[in-house]
Structure formats: C-alpha cells, structure tokens
DNA sequence: CTCCTCTAAACTGTCGACAGTTGACCGTAG
DNA sequence: CTACGGTCAACTGTCGACAGTTTAGAGGAG
C-alpha cells in the first residue's frame, strides 16, 4: 500500500500534495475506513503517506470546510459524526435551498434549459422502465444540479454541495429506494411543469415538498430496516 | 503598532496564535485596510506580526471557510471581491434560510422564548423612540439569532453567519437606514405574531418577505446615492 | 477496591529553511 | 511598435524540528 501511494503521489504531484491527501482522506471517510468520531492522527498519517505534516494539516482544514471533519484546537481533527436527527435538519436546509433554486429557475429558464429538463426526464423514464435505480439516481443528481445552475446563484452551488456531503457522512443515507422511483419521477415532472410555466411560487413549493418527501421516505426505511449494510456503493457522487 | 500587536499576541497566547491572527485579518478586511481583490502576502505579514507563516496560513484557511477570502493554489489568498449582484444573491439565500428558521421556531418556541421576543421588540421600540439606529441594529441581530436558536437546527447558525459575513464584505451594505426602522419593526412584529400563534407557514412567509424587503431597500439606496452599477437592477428587483 | 495525583508519552501548534512554481520584466525578432 | 521568448525575483508549498498542552496510565491514599 505504501508503494502504491507513493507512486500515486508522484504521478499527480503537479496538482499539489494537499489535493492528493484530501482526496485520499475523503475516500477513507466516505468508504468508512475512517469511522465517524474517529480521530485523524497527523503524525501517523504523515508517516504512512510519506509526507510531512503540513499538507496533511491543510487537507484537514479543507475537509472541515466541506463539513466532513471537525477540528478542535489542541485536541485534533475528528471525522464528523452525523446523527440521524442531524440528517433530518440537513434535509430541511437542502429543501429550502433547492426550493430557492427552483424558484429562480422558473424565472430564468430558457428554451434550451427546458429541453435539457425534457431530456433528463426521459432518461429517468427509461431508467424506471429498465428498473435501473443507479441510472435513475444519476439522472436525479443531474436534474437538481441543472436547476441550481439555471438559478444563476453562484453561492447556492457550493452551499448545497456542502450540505449534501455532510449528509452523505451518515452512510445509511446512501441507500437508494428503487420502489420510490415512480413517485420521485412524478414529483420531478411537477417541478418541471412549474418551471416550464414560469411559475416560481409553484416550482418552489413543489421542490420543497419533493425533498422533504424523499427525506421522510429515507428516514422511514431506516426505522424499519436499521441494521442493514449497504453494498450498493454507487451512491458516491462525481462532483464538480 | 508592532509593540501593540506583540503585547496583544502575548496576552491571548493561551488561545492559539492562529485565532489572534484570524481576528486581526478579519478586522483588517472588514475595516477596509485590506481591500477587496487585494492579495494577502504571507511572508510580509509574518514579518509584520512577528510570527512564522504557519499560523498565518491557518488563519487564511479559516477566513476562506468563512467566505472572506479566496485561496488559489500557488497564487495566493485574495480578499473576496463581492459585487452588488452577488449581494443580491446572498440575500436570497439568507431569506430562504431565515424563513426556514422562522418556520421551525413557530413550531418549537416555548413560553420563555416568546418572552425573549417581547423583550427584544421592546428594546427595538425604545431604540426607535430614541432614534438610535445603532441600538436598533443590535437588537435586530439578536432577534434573528434568537429565531435561529429556537429553530434548533444547529447547522443553520453557521451557514447564516457565513452568508452574513460574506455580504458584509461589500462595505456599502453596512450602512444603516434609520428611516426604515419603523417599517422593519412592524415586520418583526408580524413575524413574532406568527411564531406566537404557532403558525409556521405564516412565520416563514413573513420572514422571507422581511429579508427581501430589507435587501431591496438597501440596494435601492445604493442605486440612488452611488455609482450606477446595473441599470436593470431596480426593475429586476421589483419582481421579488 | 476506588478515587485522586502526578508523571510521562503522544500529539498539536509553531518555527525557520528550502525547493518548485508563478508572474513580471527585459530583450529580441518581426 | 508589437509580439514572443527567456531570465529572474518573489512567493507559496513542503519539510523536519522544537515547545507547550493534553491525555492516559502508574502509583499512592482512603
């Protein structure tokens, strides 16, 4: 493992060591190698990855900025520990922000934007027909990102991504619910219709309802089948 | 100035150098000593403040986390440059988040919480009677923070503060509008009434309206008294 | 046996130094 | 006069070391 890391580091060195370390740590957190609440030992990591502590410290600050760890002065950095109750709160925030995005999108959407939506909705339909939850999930992310993009609010993007990352720390939240695809699709369609009609109020309301609904479905499924492990790790997001 | 800084640093050393540097830089940015777009030179600062570059770097990362600077790899850290158009977007976000807080506050507020509100509203009334804009402004902040606290959503607090900090970078946004105090007070009263009545929907709507209204007043006063940035701004704002 | 105290190991915060990269200035060619 | 290329200074990224603080564990008292 050491040799592999060393090689990897050498290869991408043009991108700054800190960035590489950041990706490694993010991976280790999202895949559960580093468990919530666990402490990240700078010295040990620097020895393991064969780099000095400086880039590791920097990577940790970036992780904190993205909400994935918490840094306590003179105590260390700890992998964020997300309770289910906090996931609930995070979804509330995301619902509000996504609703804002939908509201603005209904104002600014162009004809081409609407075509984009139609295409995404078609992909979703196909995914449902093929019972391909993974594909549907991908399209879902694109749908939401498209709305944020159209809204034109640059800060919204980073904010929502941060919320999303943090919620993802609760690994249980990454399971997909294939049986909800058709419900979700119908809601997406309502949102699209509101945007198409240029109705900000309606778009906002529908979006908020959609996100809260998804959250409740998720939490309910957690209640019923709690101790389930999630092998379908396709939930990792390709960000940017 | 050097001596003063040194003494200050010594005095609070128990609280980590990075924290002291952070406060200094924040001050310098908010007071305009460091101007938007200006680059922060680590070496020069470390010489000026008589500390090594490490704590300065760390302070810069924290500033970035709070949205006050932007760090570009191998280029340096630059004081965030906020356009008026971006302030508009930031207020949109804040309106959504504050509306969420008000919604939840209407659900969770206790009798003591309501008493807190009554007290704050009284302070506002007094400030208006004394024509004390500064005091009113202080009470206003407490009012909003109280709502966020009552909402019980821990992430909301940090998020809103970040938005607020970033908007404050546009120094023009820091002017107070004494003539709006009574309007603002009435709106606060409406929000309080909705929370008191346990009406989340109404509280949310009133809050959103309040923040957007404050924003428009602010931007309008900028339009009339300042350089004409965006001629279409007024028209576009009217639709909100 | 339990609780408190004190000591030592471990770890983070800070430091000064070096190396690689970036941006700018200067000179040359078209 | 302008555009392109090369050289150089400055600055950030990274490194290894030291100091102060925290935590854990050993030892003693109740």
Image: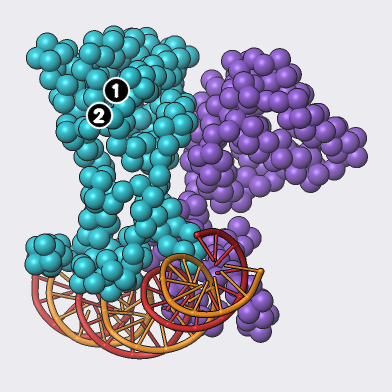
Chain colours: A cyan, B purple, C red, D orange
| Secondary-structure class at tag 2 | loop
Q: Chain of mark 2?
A: A
Looking at the picture, does residue A96 appear above or below residue A36? above
To which quarter of the image does residue A76 belong?
bottom left
How far from the left and from the top, in percent, is residue D28? 56, 79
- Residue B151, percent from left and from top: 60, 30
Position of the C terminus of chain A, as image quadrant, is top left
Question: Quick check: can you spot residue B112?
Answer: yes
Question: Residue A4 at what x, y percent from top left?
Answer: 9, 63
Residue ID for mark 2: A228
Of all chains, the one bearing label 1 is A
- Give the CA separation, mark 2 to mark 1: 6 Å
Tell me if residue B128 comes above or below residue A137 in the rendering. below
Q: Residue at x 67, y 81 (%)?
A: B7
A229 vs B84, nearest the viewer: A229
For numbered disc 1, what is the local secondary structure?
loop
Q: Does residue B143 appear to the left or right of B128 in the view shown?
A: left
Snapshot quadrant of residue B34: bottom right
On whether disc 2 and disc 1 are found on a single subunit, the reply is: yes
Q: Residue at x 39, y 50 (%)?
A: A37
Disc 1 marks which residue?
Answer: A225
Is label 2 in contact with label 1 (beta carbons under 8 Å)?
yes
Q: Is residue A106 visible?
A: no
Other-residue count near label 2 (Cα within 10 Å), few / some / many at <14 / 14–19 / ≥20: few
Query: In the rendered picture of this protein, how many numbered marks are placed on residues?
Result: 2
Task: Pick whichever, C24 or B98, lies toward us.
Answer: B98
Label 1 CA crowd tier, 10 Å (few <14, some 14–19, many 20+): few
At x 64%, y 32%, the residue is B150
The quarter of the rendered structure image containing the N terminus of chain A is: bottom left
């Amino acid at each position: 493992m050491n040799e592999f890391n060393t090689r990897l580091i050498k290869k991408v060195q043009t991108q700054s060591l800190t960035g590489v370390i950041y990706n490694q740590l993010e991976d280790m957190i999202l895949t559960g190698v580093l468990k919530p609440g666990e402490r990240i030992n700078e010295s040990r990591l620097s020895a393991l990855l064969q780099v000095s502590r400086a880039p590791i410290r920097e990577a940790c600050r970036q992780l904190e900025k993205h909400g994935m760890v918490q840094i306590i002065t003179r105590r260390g950095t700890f992998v964020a520990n997300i309770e289910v109750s906090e996931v609930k709160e995070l979804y509330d925030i995301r619902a509000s922000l996504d609703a804002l995005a939908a509201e603005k999108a209904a104002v600014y959407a162009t004809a081409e934007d609407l075509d984009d939506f139609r295409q995404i909705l078609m992909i979703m339909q196909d995914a449902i027909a093929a019972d391909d939850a993974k594909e549907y999930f991908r399209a879902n992310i694109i749908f939401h990102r498209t709305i944020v993009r159209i809204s034109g609010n640059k800060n919204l993007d980073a904010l929502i991504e941060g919320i999303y990352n943090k919620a993802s720390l609760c690994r249980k939240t990454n399971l997909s619910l294939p049986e909800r695809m058709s419900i979700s699709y119908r809601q997406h369609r309502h949102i699209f219709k509101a945007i198409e009609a240029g109705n900000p109020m309606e778009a906002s309301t529908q979006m908020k309802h959609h996100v809260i609904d998804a959250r409740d479905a998720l939490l309910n499924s957690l209640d019923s089948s709690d101790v389930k492990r999630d092998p379908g790790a396709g939930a990792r997001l390709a960000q940017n």
